[in-house]
Amino acid sequence: MSSHPASEPVCTECATPEIDSIIEPQERDLGGFSVRRVLPSRARRMVGPFVFFDEMGPAKFAPGKGIDVRPHPHIHLATVTYLFSGEIDHRDSTGVHQTIQPGAVNWMIAGRGIVHSERTGPDERNRASELHGIQLWVALPQTHEEIEPAFEHHPADTLPELELDGVRLRLLAGSAYGATSPVRALSTLFYAEARIPAGHSIALPADHHDRAAYLVRGIVRCESEGKETEHVDRPRMLVFSPGHNVSLRAEQDAHVMLLGGAPLEGKRHMWWNFVSSSAERIERAKTDWQEGRFPKVPGDEQEFIPAP
């Protein structure tokens, strides 16, 4: 989704030494379609290399309706789209046209510059439909910021699935829990979906510096060193302090996204859809978009989102 200017989520409290930040999402209506924006926030600009986190929906659409995110540009990041329900038609300036469905991962590396659109496809639009999922942005290491743009689609059956003490886990990107995703991550990170039955628990990976958990649904309590540190019963993100052993126990069947990794070298600047280690590079991208120097999206050339 395109990153329109918005007020940022806030850290409501930082309750214990084990928890660095607790981030309440900022809900936004994008014209009949709502998102919960978690990153960036006032409390945390990044978690590992992750600079942007939106929960899309859940939304229901009448026949003839859907989403239409017109062509827009990115530089120096990778977008990560993962759906729980519904589908999205992705098109980009490398010529890719790919429909993403639940359980699959769309991983688009912007590199030196890419343009893409995200729309409800014609077949999906002909009937009542729904959409619910997560979109993340991952900032690229400085050595990879100017690489050629690329797109990868990973069907659901290609992603590692684990069961750990009754918890069902799907590894979407990076490495964790002894498994590695086929997604071409360009830095040290992990991104996973966990389904935790009531009464069961899962530990956060201890081998990653930054770690966070976002509750999609259910009720969990956070435990560290045998004591409860936080109780979560609505969508919010917990960002954990490095060096603490932390686990999540479900008090009610829970659906949780886990993410983190190693911090990138240096600061990252962010403006609209552009992320870079260089403020000057963002200014150049801004001018390039305004003056029409980015490539077009084949099959979706007629519309675009103007820069704010």
Image (cartoon, rainbow, N blue to C red):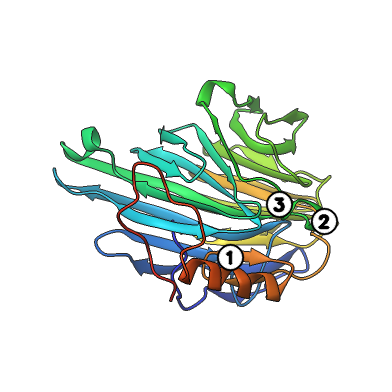
Q: Residue 276's spot in the image, x, y percent?
A: 68, 65
Q: Looking at the image, tell me whether mark 1 or mark 2 is earlier in sequence order.
A: 2
Amino acid tagged 1 = Phe
Foreground disc of the pair 1, 2: 1
Q: Residue 15's spot in the image, x, y percent?
A: 68, 72
According to the image, label 2 marks what residue? 244
Gap between marks 3 and 2 measured at Cα: 14 Å
Residue at figure coordinates x 40%, y 53% from the top left: 56
Amino acid tagged 2 = His
Residue at figure coordinates x 76%, y 43% from the top left: 205
Task: Indicate which disc residue 5 carries.
Answer: none
Q: Residue 8's spot in the image, x, y percent?
A: 52, 76
Q: Nearer the viewer, residue 70 or 47?
A: 70
Task: Indicate which disc residue 274 carries.
Answer: 1
Q: Quadrant of the C terminus?
A: bottom left
| Secondary structure of residue under mark 1 | strand
Q: Nearer the viewer, residue 156 or 153?
A: 153
Please report contact status of discs 1 and 2: CB closer than 8 Å, yes or no: no
Please report contact status of discs 3 and 2: CB closer than 8 Å, yes or no: no
Residue 280, picture quadrant = bottom right
According to the image, label 3 marks what residue? 260
Foreground disc of the pair 1, 3: 1
Q: Nearer the viewer, residue 232 or 215?
A: 215
Crowding near the residue tagged with mark 2, few <14, some 14–19, many ≥20 C-alpha atoms within 10 Å: some
Amino acid tagged 3 = Gly
Q: Quadrant of the N terminus?
A: bottom left
Q: Residue 106's spot in the image, x, y percent?
A: 52, 38
Please report contact status of discs 1 and 3: CB closer than 8 Å, yes or no: no
Horizontal side of residue 51 vs 56, given as left or right: right
